[in-house]
Image (tube, rainbow, N blue to C red):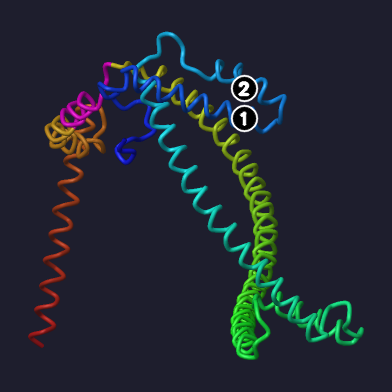
């Protein structure tokens, strides 16, 4: 059976052969093996109850093709992993047996040389334990000098890497500490500025509120004054007979008509103004005119005398 083509996607379409009796039998056999393994783990009692577990793990009388396909793919994957685990376990068991045989040979050789663990003096045993501890620490499996040198060099390299990382972390932590200190100082300055701004804002708001209150009182008095002036203007308009029909155009027409009348009546007014000095009676007016004529004649005679006198004086 080709297990590479199988997968564990239950939503994939099932092949036509998975619903056959062979596929169902294969899945039932895998379930029975699982039940048998589970029963064998519990000893005799487990083996006695294996049939019931197998019956419980078997497919029903009418399995669906998709369920059979999913269980078949799961069985293939489980069997493949079981084979891989068996191969790995066999290799580990063979390696462990080789290590045990080598340990037995080394123990026999040490006993023949008189270097058995129980025969060693306490200082030698302590030294051997120290060497074993160092070997375990350095992850080496022999006591060759080259192995210790390589392990020591590897340990030195790791130490250098650790020191380099530590220096790098120390520099980063120092830089972070400096940055944190600067951030704290900046935060302190910002807090002070915020407190100053709050005080300035409160002071400005207080001054602005006082200014607004003063302006409000002044505007209130102006409002009362304007209301009184409006009332007076309305009363004056009512007295002069103002109506809403008298608009700007009408007033302009009346002003032009007034100018026209003034232009026409000005000569008449000037003539009448020259007669304002005349008495209202006709006889008195005639006497006043004669008097004005005599005064005019006297003024002309006086002017001639003055001119004659001036001419005579100039001839001398």
- Label placed on residue 143: none
Is the N terminus in the top left, top right, bottom left or bottom right quadrant?
top left
Earlier-in-chain disc, 2 versus 1: 1
The magenta stretch is: 245-258
Residue situated in front as seen by the camera: 97 or 306: 97
Q: Answer yes or no: do the residues labelled 2 and 1 have beta carbons within 8 Å?
A: yes
Q: Residue at x 54, y 29 (%)?
A: 34
In the rendered image, residue 213, in percent from the top left (x then y), is placed at: 65, 42
**Residue under label 2:** 50
Image-based side of 184 in relation to 93, left or right: right
- At 64% from the left and 68% from the top, the residue drawn is 99
Residue 278 sits above or below residue 212 on the image = above
Q: Residue at x 62, y 80 (%)?
A: 171
In front here: 135 or 237?
Answer: 135
Residue 162 forms part of the magenta stretch: no
Q: Residues within 10 Å of mark 2 (few under 14, many from 20)?
A: many
The quarter of the picture where the C terminus appears is bottom left
Q: Where, by quadrant of the figure, is residue 163 drawn?
A: bottom right
Find the distance from the CA under tag 2 to the CA under tag 1. 8 Å
SS for dot 1: helix
Query: Pointer 1: what residue?
Result: 38
Q: Residue at x 59, y 87 (%)?
A: 150
């Amino acid at each position: 059976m080709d297990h590479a083509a199988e997968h564990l996607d239950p939503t994939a379409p099932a092949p036509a052969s998975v619903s056959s009796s062979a596929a169902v039998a294969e899945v039932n056999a895998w379930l029975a093996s699982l039940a048998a393994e589970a029963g064998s783990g519990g000893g005799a009692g487990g083996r006695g109850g294996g049939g019931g577990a197998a019956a419980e793990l078997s497919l029903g009388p009418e399995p669906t093709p998709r369920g059979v396909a999913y269980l078949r793919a799961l069985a293939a994957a489980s069997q493949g992993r079981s084979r891989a685990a068996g191969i790995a376990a066999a290799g580990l068991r063979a390696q462990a047996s080789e290590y045990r045989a080598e340990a037995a040979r080394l123990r026999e050789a040490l006993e023949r040389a008189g270097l058995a663990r129980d025969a060693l003096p306490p200082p030698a045993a302590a030294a051997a334990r120290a060497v074993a501890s160092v070997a375990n620490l350095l992850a080496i499996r022999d006591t060759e000098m080259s192995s210790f040198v390589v392990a020591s060099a590897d340990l030195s390299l790791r130490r250098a890497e650790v020191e380099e990382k530590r220096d790098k972390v120390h520099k980063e932590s120092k830089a972070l500490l400096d940055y944190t200190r600067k951030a704290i100082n900046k935060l302190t300055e910002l807090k002070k500025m915020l407190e100053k701004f709050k005080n300035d804002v409160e002071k400005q708001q207080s001054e602005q509120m006082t200014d607004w209150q003063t302006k409000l009182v002044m505007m209130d008095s102006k409002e009362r004054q304007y209301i009184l002036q409006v009332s007076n203007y309305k009363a004056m308009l009512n007295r002069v007979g103002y109506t809403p029909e008298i608009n700007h155009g009408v007033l302009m027409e009346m002003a032009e008509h007034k100018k026209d009348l003034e232009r026409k009546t000005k000569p008449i007014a000037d003539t009448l103004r020259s007669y304002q000095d005349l008495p209202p009676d006709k006889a008195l007016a005639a006497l006043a005119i004669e008097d004005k004529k005599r005064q005019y004649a006297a003024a002309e005679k006086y002017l001639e005398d003055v001119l004659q006198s001036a001419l005579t004086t100039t001839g001398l």
